[in-house]
Amino acid sequence: MSEAALRVLQSEMDEPALSELGAGEVSLFSASNPTTGSGNEDAAAALPFDDDAWVLAVADGMGGERAGGRASALAIESLEASLVEARREGWMLRTAILNGFERGHAAIRDLGLGAGTTLAAVEIAGGAVRPYHVGDSAILQIGQRGKLKLQTVSHSPVGFAVEAGFIDEGEAMQHEHRHLVSNVLGAPDMRIEVGSLRPLQARDTLLLASDGLYDNLLTDEIVALLRAGPLGAASARLADLARTRMRALGEAGPSKPDDLTFVAYRPSRSSRAGRKARA
């Protein structure tokens, strides 16, 4: 592989880390709940597949610091191992990602700790993207002018209620069952939701994040922060506002302290030239 994998596993970061990824940039951030001092159960990565394909991923573990942190790390490590194997064996990228989800699920079950984790992933290949997810770590694709081109539906009772129109986003953020997740790696009936292949335009921004972000910022706020300006500065603003909200318990606006992890990616203006989307 021409580029090294970027990983943050149970990390404590003061600010997002910005790196080149192919013909674009990727920003990763991860830190624990700022109000408790407990360990971070989240993990994330930007993983190369070949010279023109990468996978972004975020996992939010559950089951206590030891179990949840191990589960999220296993999800990322299993995904990376599957990509390495697929490259060696000549498998398709889609097959490699699905195998990675299944491998992580089996490894978490084998722990015998009752642990689980969400896992959201995006393949980036040949000027196109495809989302995959289990749980409530959501994926957004934002156009340069602020158009929301993709927003995955959280696998949770509240997430499904929002999608069906029974409650709005503001009500969902305050719902007493907001924390319940109905589908995770490690659960007996885990299922993987796979989205369609869609174009990635120059200056689009991809975002994958744990619920530490989506429980503290409205979607419109996230879009406004990420769509304009350099990716590094936009990511820093996103992390700062989310963690400020977490510390503002009792004040107006959403505030739910939690671990916070996200991966943001933006291609360069010329990254799609001469490329065709992969099936």
Image (spheres, grey):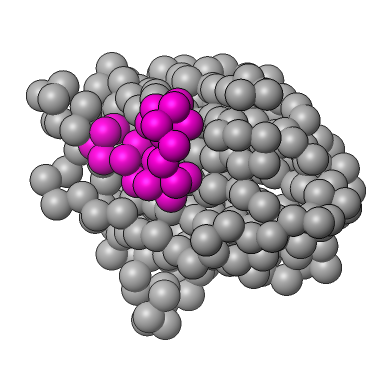
Judge left or right: residue 268 versus residue 10.
right
Query: Quick one: 181 or 253, which is closer to the camera?
Result: 181
Judge left or right: residue 52 versus residue 236.
left
Query: Quick one: 172 or 21, which is closer to the camera?
Result: 21
Would residue 78 be visible to someone looking at this image? yes
| Range covered by the magenta-colored residues | 82-105
Could you tell me residue 21's position as x and y percent?
72, 33
136 above or below 24? below
136 above or below 239? below
Outermost residue to the bottom: 165
| Quadrant of the rendered image containing residue 223 | bottom right
Could you tell me residue 262's position as x and y percent?
58, 38
Q: Name the quarter where the N terminus is drawn.
A: top right
At x 62% / y 49%, what residue is drawn? 125
Could you tell me residue 56's position as x and y percent?
55, 40
Q: Is residue 98 highlighted in magenta?
A: yes
190 above or below 237? below
Judge left or right: residue 204 versus residue 126.
right
Outermost residue to the front: 90
At x 64% / y 69%, what residue is drawn? 149
Could you tell me residue 97's position as x and y percent?
41, 43
Q: Is residue 37 highlighted in magenta?
A: no
23 above or below 272? above
Query: Quick one: 253 or 273, which is closer to the camera?
Result: 273
Number of marks: 0
At x 50% / y 25%, what residue is drawn? 32
Would residue 64 be visible to someone looking at this image? no
The majority secondary structure of the magenta stretch comes to helix
At x 64% / y 31%, what residue is drawn? 28
